[in-house]
Image (cartoon, rainbow, N blue to C red):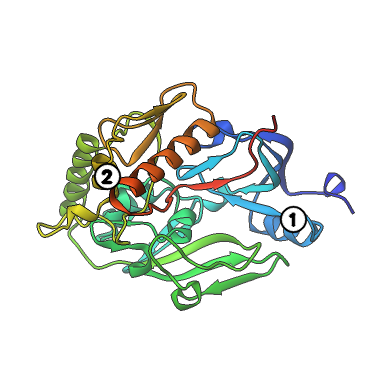
Amino acid sequence: MTIDTLTVRGKLTKQKNLNDLTWLRVGGPADYLFQPADLEGLQKFLRDLPTDVPIFPMGVGSNLIVRDGGLRAVVIRLGRGFNGISVEGNTVTAGAAALDAHVARKAADAGVDLTFLRTIPGSIGGAVRMNAGCYGSYTADVLRKATIVTRQGEVVDLSPEELNFRYRQSDLPEGAVLVSATLEGPSGDAEELHARMTAQLQKRDETQPTKDRSAGSTFRNPAGFSSTGRADDVHDLKAWKVIDDAGMRGATKGGAQMSPKHSNFMINTGEATAADLEGLGEEVRKKVYETSGITLEWEIMRVGEPLKE
């Protein structure tokens, strides 16, 4: 059986350009894009898919550069069948396609504090995969279980220990697609939680280029710690600080720019290619190493092939 002869529950598109599916609006075509109708559709697809065909689960593309030559894989993108959010007591169950911001708001409505998720771009699937966090809180702190579909089409629950959370990393079985997460947050007053999130959004808009095409933080903080916002926060080990010290705030390459507003945010000023963005990032890493001896690690995931000459 070949992929073209599969009967699918959902939508299967051949040679799908991914540039309109990422926040940076760059990227070549995937061999296929599969959007399953529901859980059973995803299970069937993974069971039937030839084992030699690679898959790439993709969220909302908020933390991703797809290279200009595209992706030799089936991109699996979850949609409406996977974005439900339910709250029972202090437990919140969210589909992998549910946006972090929506989960934070729905939880706050029920008096559950998951406010740190409010300003994190992307979906819950990506938050689990990357152990997303801010304000001193991480997904690992609140996750109770993650539900995946294996490459064999089986539904399996994973514990936080099995995910082996680290700074901006977790371990998922090869070929698995994360479909939902169960989170538990402390109790709080709904009005106060919403007020806190409003203040967080205001602070974010003041300090980050939220109106520009970016993919969030470009590089991990050198010490491996996220910004806590606390009074004793050590700023000399922040990525933005070493980028500033290297004179790379506002640096450009083609249509790519390190934001003048926040130097650890890379933006597409309009006509950037993936090569511009990744190339600028590598120039920043080189300059930072030359000036401080620190090797910055990418936080943005880069996948796919460069455009062939």
For the C terminus, the image quarter is top right
Q: Give x and y (percent) for residue 73.
A: 71, 48
Residue at x 21% of width, y 57% of height: 228
Marks 2, 1: nearer the viewer: 2
Q: Quadrant of residue 229?
A: bottom left
Residue 182 badge: none
Q: Is residue 184 above or below residue 265?
A: below
Nearer to the camera, 101 or 243: 243
Q: In this orientation, does residue 36 appear?
A: no
- The vertical placement of 201 against 104, above or below, is above
Residue 45: assigned label: 1
Q: Is residue 205 depicted above or below 197 in this figure?
A: above
Q: Which mark is residue 240?
A: 2
Q: Is residue 186 left or right of residue 256?
A: left
Q: Secondary structure at mark 2?
A: helix
Q: Residue at x 25, y 40 (%)?
A: 244
Q: Nearer the viewer, residue 162 or 37?
A: 162
Horizontal and vertical percent position of residue 53: 77, 54
Q: Amino acid at mark 2?
A: Trp
